[in-house]
Amino acid sequence: MKRREFVGGIAAAAGLAGCSQADNENTGVQKAQQRFEWSCVTSWPPKFPGLGMAVENLARRLERASAGRLKIKVYGGGELVPAFEVFDAVSRGAVEMGHDASYYHKGKVDAAQFFTAIPFGMNCTELNAWIYYGGGLKLWRELYEPFNLVPFLCGNTGVQMGGWFNREIKSVDDLQGLKMRIPGLGGEVLRRAGGTPITLPGAEIFTSLQTGAIDATEWVGPYNDVSFGLHKAARYYYYPGWQEPGPGLECIINRDAWESLPDDLQALVEITCQAITTDMVAEYSHGNANSLQQLLEDPNVDVRPFPPDVLQHLNVITRKLIDELAAKDPAVAKVSVPYYEYLTKMETNTRISEYAYLDTRR
Ligand code: CA
């Protein structure tokens, strides 16, 4: 038998019984009859709007489109493994699939952050272009190879909001001492700008903001922020989300599990992950537009842009930070150099197409 068994025991439930004849195991007929039952762990609360529903949709569509040959059971964060251990669980083959954001692997695989979002980096359209046509996917696959993982882009929230603030940000000075829930590279940028970044699980954000334990928080955008009630805990809602300009989500598959799939099911997984990104962008655009309307009509909420010099300051800090990371870690440099080359080229294109057009609708 050439088929590799992967560790973790889940494979035993994969409905592969009856394939004992090495002779005909790989014939088309045999492969077409194989059924796979996989588990997918995620970093999201179960069925969470947007993020959690995207992976439920992925599983449902794969099962339907494969006529039940690929059945995936989705687990919310903490149900099977802790929310931030998705990468490890799929890597060691305890489960076949995971859905999370690659910037959660900061500290383990720093270069992975470029495949979710970098402050002042690519937006959703630009990230799609880089991943699918600009060499991004190849770099991503190489980065995850030692972890026995195959990554797929699977979702995007679109540009986020800068966040909720209980004090006005009129200049760079107002960032001094600002206690803000902001994870990842964005948090490090805030720290270098004089603020105090704090990491909090989603469930604690509202209370921390309301009690004054923190001065500000970023979360996602109007759609998710209103469902968390953040507009009842802070007055100022700043934009844009410089820290997350179009974060891509990932579907990761254990390499042995991936290689056990016949070609048509592999194609189905690739196509469905792309479809989920399209679907999620539509869901967020729809949800954000509705929730933003509600916020603009709320007399207790003040939606406003960051001052340009504050954004410029944070941008300069970001580039220095990335340069430092790239100098320390060759894996970061291998991704960051082509990333910024691509972004520079794309920036010109985006400016004379999308930006220029949007200006005509003012
Ligand atoms: Ca965010």
Image: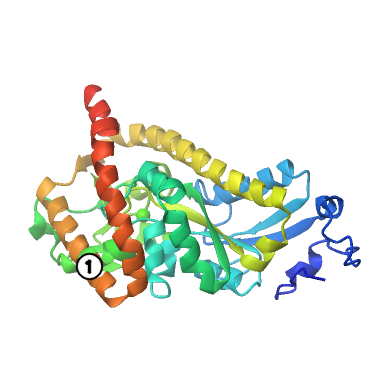
On the rendered structure, is 337 left or right of 11? left
Tally the numbered discs: 1
Residue found farthest to the top: 361
Q: Quadrant of residue 125?
A: top left
On the rendered structure, is 232 left or right of 359? right
Quadrant of the rendered image holding ligand 1:
bottom left
Against 57, is 23 above or below?
A: below
Which x, y percent locates residue 166?
Answer: 22, 53
Q: Nearer the viewer, residue 33 or 182?
A: 33
- Please name the residue shown 23% across and 29% down the image: 356
* Quadrant of image for the N terminus: bottom right
Which x, y percent locates residue 126?
Answer: 36, 44
Which x, y percent locates residue 241?
Answer: 28, 49
Against 321, is 266 above or below?
A: above
On the rendered structure, is 48 left or right of 226? right
Q: Nearer the viewer, residue 264 or 64?
A: 264
Q: Can residue 158 be spotted in the picture?
A: no
On the rendered structure, is 177 left or right of 344? left
Which x, y percent locates residue 13?
Answer: 80, 65
Q: Quadrant of residue 57?
A: top right
Q: Secondary structure at mark 1?
A: helix
- Please name the residue shown 33% across and 53% down the image: 244
Residue found farthest to the front: 23
Q: Nearer the viewer, residue 52 or 65?
A: 65
Q: Can residue 350 be spotted in the picture?
A: yes
The colour scheme used here is: rainbow
Instruction: Find disc 1 in the rendering and name its residue.
Output: 323
- Please name the residue shown 15% across and 59% down the image: 316
